[in-house]
Image (cartoon, coloured by chain):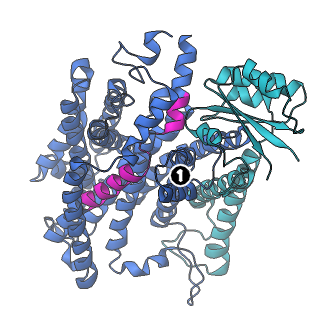
Chain colours: A blue, B cyan
Amino acid sequence: MEPQATGTAKSDALIEGEQSNLSLHQSLLRPVWQPPGIRFWALMGPATVLTGIYFYSAFLTVTRGIGEWGNHIPVAWAFGIVNFVWWIGIGHAGTLISAILLLFLQKWRTSINRIAEAMTIFAVMCAGTFPLLHLGRPWYFYWLLPYPDTMHVWPQFKSPLTWDVFAVSTYLIVSIIFWYVGMVPDLAALRDSSPKKYQRALYGALSLGWRGSTHNWRQYQSVYLLLAGLATPLVLSVHTIVSFDFAVSILPGWHETVFPPYFVAGALHSGFAMVLMLVIPVRWALRLEHVITGRHLSALAKLAIATSWLVGYGYAMEHFINRYGGDQYDVHEYAARVTGHYAWIWALMITCNVLVPQFFWSKKLRHNTWFLWFAALLINVGMWCERFVIVVLSLYQDFIPSHWRDYAPRLVDLGLFFGSMGLFTLLFLLFLRYLPPVPVSDMKELHHELKKEAA
Amino acid sequence: MGAWVLAGFPEEKPMVEAAGKLRGEGYTLELFTPFPSPDGYEVLPGPSMVPLFTLCGGVAGVCIGFFFQWWANAFNFPIIVGGRPFFSIPTYVPICFECMVLLASFSGLYCFFIACRLPKLDHPLAGSELFARHTIDRFVLAVRWERETPSDPLEQRLHALGAAELDPVRDS
């Protein structure tokens, strides 16, 4: 065996160190079997507090009504939609890494795909809560679905908002199916190495009694590939439909044909940043540096450069079309965006989304995990600003100047926003604690393939 | 009365070669591996119905999505909203697409469960410690052993073919 294959010397190997099936099995499942350390509880504490704030804010919203939010006319869509689009965009990179890179036979996806998929699911969950709360009476959410009600009225299927209900719920369900199917063999591996009887029973039930026979693997590979093939157009459709919520309207700043690709690119941009933000602490805390190597981080950073140019093109296009179209309301809206007193948010968006990722051209900075983490944080800030610019800055100065009104979030808005981050972190930590964070059977397969290539 | 002989191999290649030889001699075999083994598929060829079922689910999804939107908005209770036509194919596309993905995914999932007979919490070989290692690090070749004579040369054959461990499991 050559050293390059398992990468004892090269820092950009996919699997570092001399490994075997057994060593991968033990090191990758260690986080599940080991009792959680101080680092886990140190993160769990703040996450629980923030989750508490989230639920308290949701409680206030539900009991006192939507007036607790800073929304008003004309800014009727504010934090609720900004946060919805931000979270759902974050989710998109998870599907891209797990499905699209699988179809493109990118081997580096293997060790981070489960973390990315878990991120997708929890991000979509957080995203979904915002429009539900924005309904004001979330317990009537089922009115959105087509069901035979006593008034015999059906949802209006020609509205992008109805498409959104179908797109987001399909996305959540299919992401969970994809995640779970991929995990079945690993749950069986957990079952077969359980130290305690109740763990064996628990993981045995979760694995549904999976055995790795040739017949079963054939079915598994078939369904996994098909799900990847279905998830790939799905992920593109979801943010396209989210962008239709805006683009199908006739409002200046929203009515733009560039929106679907620009939204998808923005979604992937924030998603890669979020994967970086999650993977960097996780590989350190769970000692997964041998499978989530510098090469993975570097590849994610390179993708962020690509998506930064895509969103940059979107910004340039918005600028160009406003000038070229010359519609007075469009021109005013854009001028207010760039020079108005929210212009600093627009400037922050350009800086974080387009300029910060350009540092990733430097190989040295790509391999500096601290730098990567903070740059990823800035990208996520920038992407949140982008949604704020789109939603609030297009609304606060509408067609009639007497309607113009500034927007400021209220405490409940902030509680829901920061609280949703706590909820996300809490769910993510529970995932890391109880489920295999790195796909074990896939890693064994990858190790086997690399060994074969080297031989 | 019969039994299975389980042979554990540390590597995939010798297991596949041993399986190929024994298969040629007419033994009934099954391979259990920690990860998918494309070479093993060649030794034990078989169909997968998953793609067909997924296709059917997808086609059904498009049809149901399309038909339902027409039925609800253009036939059962037409309401004029923004002057849009009741029957408008372009606006039906997104929901047809989402229904296709949803139904195709569920059909694929159910077909996967049915084809693998999941959930199936017990397995005839589950008592064997060697068998449990197939999800960890061993490539396990299970050979059906029709006779129950201790002088059967099968065990020696398996050793010669590279098996690291052997574990005979009798039918109960």
Q: Nearer the viewer, residue A253 or B128?
A: B128
Q: Is residue B127 above or below residue A414?
A: above
The residue lying furthest to the left in this view is: A341
Q: Quadrant of residue B65?
A: bottom right
Pointer 1 residue: A180
Indicate the secondary structure of the residue bearing disc 1: helix
10 Å crowding of disc 1: few (<14), some (14-19), many (20+): some
**Visible in this render: residue A242?**
yes
Marks counted in the figure total 1
Q: Is residue A281 toward the left or the right of residue A155 in the image? A: left
Residue A74, x across and y down, in percent: 23, 69
Residue at image point 54% right, 59% down: A201
Give the magenta range. Answer: A420-445
Write down the quadrant of residue A17 in the picture. Answer: top left
Residue shown at 13%/64% (left/top)?
A: A406
Q: Quick check: B104 left or right of A387?
A: right
Above or below, B139 against A252 in this view is above
Q: Position of residue A10 (x, y in %)?
A: 36, 14
| Side of A310 where A417 appears, left or right | left
Q: Observer-nearest residue: B123 or A105?
A: B123
Q: Chain of mark 1?
A: A
**Figure check: A224 above or below A414:** above
How far across and down, in percent of the image, does residue A247 sit?
A: 40, 55
